[in-house]
Image (tube, rainbow, N blue to C red):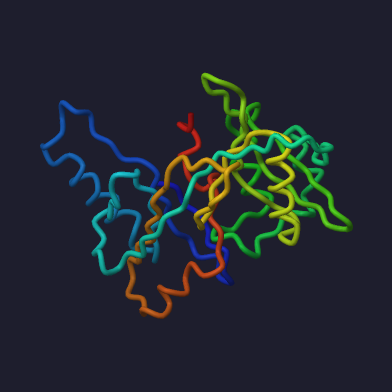
Amino acid sequence: MKSMKLNNKKNDSVFSRHSSMVLSNYRGKGIFSKLLAEVKKIYLNDTKIIIMWPNKNNFASFGINEKKIIKTKCYLYNASDNKIKTKQTSDHDINQINKFKIFIQNDNNFFLKDFEYFKNRYLLYKNREYLINKFEYKKFISFFILKKNKDKYNLNFVILDHFGSQFIKSKHLSQLINEREVIFLTKKKIDKLSHNFINHINLCVGFIKKTTFQKKTTFLLNKEFTLGDTDSFITIK
């Protein structure tokens, strides 16, 4: 369980549930159910929402009534374009993120993503795996956080997070696809020859406290989730 802050006026605290497991020899003994009850009793009294990223085979509820859960899917794509184009983006060491601090914005993110978020997420653990990709267009500047991902065939880059100008974000992505092979998450299906569908990732938003249907349906409206919000990118091959 990871404590996160919502990108709203109150910066409400929520919990993001990433993983749960019991060794095979100990399953069927009620261990997980007991642990779940303890977690809910200790941590969930002061929160309204739990974000869950169950695997592709289930929509794990974390013991929350199904009527109190919003379920949706995000889609993973691998994309590259073999057209020869001039390189227009530049790579920077993740440790230089302090130089770009003034560009960090949070308007469209579901979670509060200020400078502290990026520093704690990408500088404190395995920071050699990450880099910052910068793109400038006219007076706008956009940044992607990339993870180097080496599979058995080649080296590709996983897009984990974005900050800077939303206005040129899609143009930045298109340019990046022209320069290298990338993996990215989207809320919409894409039908392009250069985009290979990998899989979908389930997203569940569980409401602990009583919430009106209208608030539930508008809760995710125009808000973005990224692969950096999940641990899924760790096992992408």
In terms of image quadrants, where is residue 90? top right
Depicted 204 relative to depicted 36: above or below: below
**Residue found at the far right of this picture:** 138
Image position of 206 (left or right of 195): left
Q: Decide which of 26, 232 is in the foreground and name it.
A: 232
Image position of 97 (left or right of 13): right
Q: Position of residue 203 (x, y in %)?
A: 40, 54
In terms of image quadrants, where is residue 128? top right
Q: Residue at x 59, y 72 (%)?
A: 9
Q: Decide which of 199, 90 is in the foreground and name it.
A: 199
Q: Residue at x 41, y 80 (%)?
A: 214
Q: Residue at x 76, y 51 (%)?
A: 142
Q: Residue at x 72, y 39 (%)?
A: 178
In this rendering, the count of numbered labels is 0
Image position of 141 (left or right of 212): right
Q: Position of residue 147 (x, y in %)?
A: 61, 34
**Residue found at the far top of this picture:** 152
Image position of 226 (left or right of 3): right
**Residue found at the far left of this picture:** 29
Q: Position of residue 14 (x, y in %)?
A: 45, 59
Depicted 131 relative to depicted 57: above or below: above
Q: Position of residue 62 (x, y in %)?
A: 28, 53
